[in-house]
Amino acid sequence: MKKPISHFVVAAVSASVLSLSLAGAAFADNNSALQPLQVAETSSMDQAGEAVTDTWITGKVKSTFLAESSLSGMDIKVETNKGVVALSGVVASDAERELAIAKAGEIKGVTAVSADGLQTSQ
């Protein structure tokens, strides 16, 4: 099944966004003096760690859906909260719904997949 160019554009943009966190180190000024690192309160760091992890999981699930030719990844909304992935939207069949659930569950860090909001058009 051929996909329109917009699917590839979305995949490229998603990959670029996911790689931005790595770009800071690549473009750092090597001549600048190292500044001491200040440590924030532990609870704030834990919350930030969860947000980054959830964001990474969401991006990974979306990019997996876009790369899978058997899924209409543009029609599936993905949200992650503390490792639990929630899928919503409309897919063409029950088989596509089950594939989306299975693919999301394979992603590292996913503790559960909720697909209550993922409906089939049949």
Image (cartoon, helix red, strand yellow):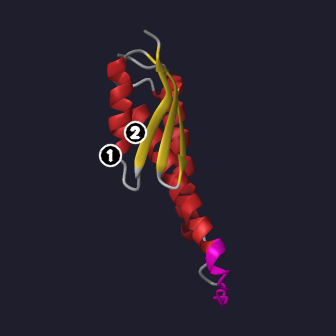
Element marked by disc 2: helix
The answer to whether residue 38 is left or right of residue 110 is: right
- Assign the magenta stretch its main secondary structure: loop
Position in image of residue 118 (x %, y %): 48, 26
Q: What is the CA distance from the residue labelled 1 to the residue labelled 2?
A: 10 Å
Q: Callout 2: 10 Å neighbours few (<14), some, many (20+)?
A: some
Circle 2 sits on which residue?
64
Q: What amino acid type is highlighted by mark number 2?
A: Thr
Query: Which residue does the image show at 48% across and 19% down from the upper left?
Result: 4
Q: Position of residue 88 (x, y in %)?
A: 53, 30
Question: Count of labels shown?
Answer: 2
Looking at the image, residue 4 sits to the left or right of residue 69; the answer is right
Relative to 104, say whether 30 is above or below. Answer: below
Screen quadrant of the C terminus = top left
**Front-most of residues 6 and 118:** 118
Q: Quarter of the image for the N terminus: give it.
A: top left
Per the image, label 1 sits on a secondary structure element best described as loop
- The answer to whether any part of residue 31 appears in the image is yes
**In front: label 1 or label 2:** 1
In the picture shown, does residue 120 fall above or below 48? Answer: above
> Which residue position holds label 1?
106
Q: Amino acid at mark 1?
A: Glu
Q: Is residue 40 magenta?
A: yes
The residue that appears at 55% across and 70% down in the rendered structure is: 25
Residue 65 within the segment the image draws in magenta: no
Q: Which residues are magenta?
A: 32-44
The spot of residue 119 in percent (x, y) is: 48, 21
Residue at the limit of the structure toward the top, as seen here: 122
